[in-house]
Image (cartoon, grey):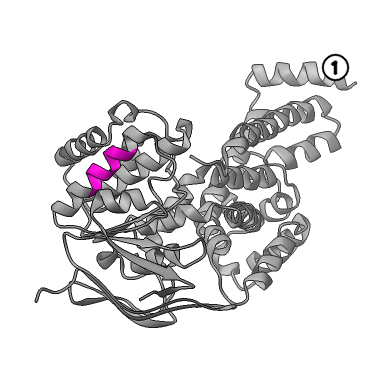
Amino acid sequence: MSTPALCCRDLEVRRASGFVLRVAELALDAGTTTAICGANGSGKSTLLLACAGLIDLSGGAIETDGALYHQGKAPAPSDMRRRVVLVTQDPYLLRGSVSRNLGWGLRLRRVPRSEQQGRISEVLGALGITALAEQEAASLSGGQRTLVAVARALVLRPALLLLDEVTRDLDREHRAAVVEAIKKSSVGGAAVMLATHDQGIVDELGASRIELNDGEIEG
Amino acid sequence: MILSGLADGVRMLLSLDPEVWHPIGVSLRVSLGACVISAALALPLGVGLGLGRFRGRNAVRTLVQASMSLPTVMVGLVLYGLLSREGMLGELGLLYTPAGMVIGQAVLAVPIMVGFSSAAFEQVDPRIQLTGLSLGASRLRAALLVASEHRAALVAAVAAGFGRVFAEVGVSMLLGGNIRGYTRNITTGIAFETGKGEFARGVALGVVLLVVALGVNLLLAWRQPRAGGEA
């Protein structure tokens, strides 16, 4: 049996009002896609933040490929976090061009300059937004911003891709492009976890579905 | 009187009168030097205070805010006590030197820069830091990203500090001693020249002070709308 790409055990996130997340066990294998569904406030975004190593855990631990990744105080160590990329619901784009946004994480990972441009062009092309490459991020619409944030995550080729409601503001054409890109990423070996209310995208991705209710996995 | 003084003053500036231009050079060197030192100390502190969440933060913030309005003469007096021959730092021989003035002005500028930058960074969009971290940055690298996204606020903090020290008199007078051709700067020069009846020379220095101060404020006004904006 292979080691899961991500494994959460006895995960607990507590706020002043009480527990907002309690997950006894959750494992994601490489090359699979998992959809986290549930009502607003059910803990989907908190679970993604926890898996991204960006929120304090009041209990439990998260492992990636069998190695302890996050426990207790956030953020998790940056060398471990570089295997994981999260796209939030309302992503922030850095000042400057779309290309600069995509290049930031690549520079952080010291990807050779000669390789950066190729990877950026490839991802922008896959999402159908090549024309935006040199556009100022500040001038983009809500849907375009989401697309750029998804591209900024995909260009890093993470082992674990976490997506929070990323298809919500997209038109049909770009939604289809994002679905294809997620599939490609999964085929390439990434474990993908996305929070969504959209059953259609769960079906299109062939994702296994996990239902969250009041911070706990149902069933 | 003011108009004729202004005309004479402009004439002196154009004729490159050393009694006018030397104090201008001293002011620029001393205040820019003080700002460089202050910025190196104050901006990391300001960013840390603005973004950090630690015990005693409110007390530190209150202290910084109170220090922003320190009377320049009091700062000059305390530093005079330290730098004078009998003072703790007297052996360094910094009293009545441009270096002593730089130290004094840096003491004035640090709280201004910390206060301005921390106030700006308290308001930053928390998504910037989250974006940096979610793309794999360390905490330090994510903080640098926040600073980079809000660099206009840092420029504003430095400009405010410069505006404060460039126009102050107390520290320069007490620590520089207004020595002709050595530590006399624009503000001590204005006080000295006007006091001895050289009104035109005082006005000439005043014009430069005004132009630089206005220039700094224009820079602030130009940069300010971009500070804290979202990409």
Please say if B168 is above or below A6: above
Give whichever of B48, A192 is nearer the camera: A192
Give x and y (percent) for residue B100: 60, 56
Q: Main secondary structure of the magenta part?
A: helix
Q: Is residue A209 visible?
A: yes
Tell me: B37 left or right of A131.
right
Question: What residue does disc 1 label?
Answer: B4
Tell me: A82 left or right of A73.
left
**Region in magenta:** A175-182
User: Judging from the image, what secondary structure is the residue with disc 1 in?
Assistant: helix
Give whichever of A64, B29 is nearer the camera: A64
What kind of residue is marked 1? Ser
Give x and y (percent) for residue A102: 30, 42
Give x and y (percent) for residue A49: 40, 65
Give x and y (percent) for residue B62: 71, 67
Give whichever of A111, A42 is nearer the camera: A42
Give whichever of B16, B213 is nearer the camera: B213
Q: Is residue A155 visible?
A: no
Please say if B214 is above or below B148: above
Please say if B58 is above or below B123: below
Kindly identify which chain the residue marked by label 1 belongs to: B
Please say if A170 is above or below A164: above
Which residue is painted at 41% across and 72% down in the image?
A74
Tell me: B82 left or right of A182.
right
Which residue is painted at 44% across and 41% down in the image?
A169
Residue B140: within the magenta? no
Q: Quadrant of residue A196?
A: bottom left
Of the 4 image quadrants, the one containing the N terminus of chain B is top right
Furthest residue toward left: A1
Residue A180: within the magenta? yes
Tell me: B96 left or right of B129.
right
